[in-house]
Image (cartoon, coloured by chain):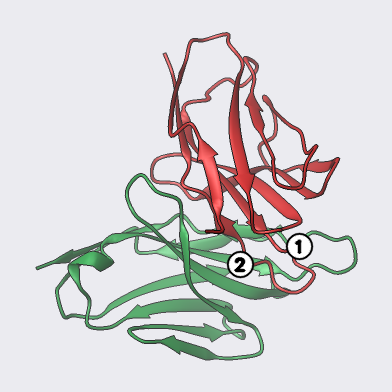
Chain colours: A red, B green
């Protein structure tokens, strides 16, 4: 059963703590993405990765970090430097970075709440 | 960069009626326009997309139209059902070339409610 998995579904964090969100895909996709979604707003791009060991900042990368050590995995770390981290985080993947058309598929999301 | 505006922000219809959601984009180089449906607490699901070389695409009760001259595209849902209730997002993308990234820019979303 191919798809994208994110864990955990819900995550609570105290202020000042770093936290890592997991994203795994078994679609054999090269490209992976992290988005942030706030109530009543569209999706905003945090980071994206074209290939293993390569990633680029998106529109709102400040306070976040990523790694891409394996093709299947693209974890996102929300650091204490992120001023307003409470949000719904979505991971996505696509065959490539849109060399044809950028058809992206999304995971179920992780809801992060900072206490 | 690309800017996508989506209207209306909320839409309420009776079961069996049609629903139309409209988006405009700013960059004439955009060539790929997907629509996503997001149910409460879940990730968005791609429901239909259209590419700039066609003007209309249908898939059962769902259709999308594209007007490249006016730079707008629309989602049409006919014979709406309560299970169509969700948040719908449009997006636009410029096809990547070489190592250039084809970024998806999303609209703000439309909350569709279908009343039985």
Image location (x, y in percent) of residue B79: 22, 82
Q: Secondary structure at mark 2?
A: strand
Query: Residue B6 is drawn in which quadrant?
Result: bottom left
Q: Is residue B60 left or right of residue A16?
A: left
x, y percent for residue A2 = 56, 58
Which residue in the structure is indicated by mark 1?
A96
Judged from the image, the secondary structure of the residue bearing numbered disc 1 is loop
Measured from the top left, where is residue A11 in percent x and y?
Answer: 45, 24
Residue at the front extreme, as displayed: A1
Q: Which residue is mark 2?
A: B92
Q: Is residue B82 above or below residue A113?
A: below
Q: How many numbered discs sit on the rendered protein?
A: 2
Percent position (x, y) of residue A104? 61, 61
Q: Residue at x 49, y 50 (%)?
A: A42
Determine the residue located farthest toward the right in the rendered image.
B98
Q: What subunit carries mark 1?
A: A
Q: Chain of mark 2?
A: B
Residue at x-position 49% and y-position 88%: B57
Within-10-Å neighbours for mark 2: few <14, some 14–19, many 20+:
many
Quadrant showing the C terminus of chain A: top left
Comparing marks 1 and 2, which lies closer to the viewer? 1
**Is A32 placed left or right of B98 in the picture?**
left
Q: Residues within 10 Å of mark 1 (few under 14, many from 20)?
A: many
**Residue at 52% of width from left, 49% of height from top?**
A107
Q: Is residue A47 left or right of residue B79?
A: right
Q: Is residue B15 left or right of residue B74?
A: left
- CA–CA distance between discs 1 and 2? 16 Å
Residue at position x 66%, y 89% in the image: B53
């Amino acid at each position: 059963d191919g798809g994208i998995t994110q864990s955990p579904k819900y995550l609570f964090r105290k202020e000042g703590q770093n936290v890592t969100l997991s994203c795994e895909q078994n679609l054999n996709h090269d490209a992976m993405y992290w988005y942030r979604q706030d109530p009543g707003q569209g999706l905003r791009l945090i980071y994206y990765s074209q290939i293993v060991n390569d990633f680029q900042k998106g529109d709102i990368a400040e306070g976040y970090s990523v790694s891409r050590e394996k093709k299947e995995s693209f974890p996102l770390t929300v650091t204490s430097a992120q001023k307003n981290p409470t949000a719904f985080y979505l991971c996505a993947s696509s065959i490539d970075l849109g060399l044809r058309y950028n058809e992206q598929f999304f995971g179920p999301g992780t809801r992060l709440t900072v206490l | 960069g690309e800017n996508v505006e989506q209207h209306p922000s909320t839409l309420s219809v009776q079961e069996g009626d049609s629903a139309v959601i409209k988006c405009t984009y700013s960059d004439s180089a955009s060539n790929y326009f997907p629509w996503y449906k997001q149910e409460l607490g879940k990730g968005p699901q791609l429901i239909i997309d259209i590419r700039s070389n066609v003007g209309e695409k249908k898939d059962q009760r769902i259709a999308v139209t594209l007007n490249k001259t006016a730079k707008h595209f629309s989602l049409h849902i006919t014979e709406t059902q309560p299970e169509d209730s969700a948040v719908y997002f449009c997006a636009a993308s410029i096809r990547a070339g070489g190592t250039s990234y084809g970024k998806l820019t999303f609209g703000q979303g439309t909350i569709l409610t279908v009343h039985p």
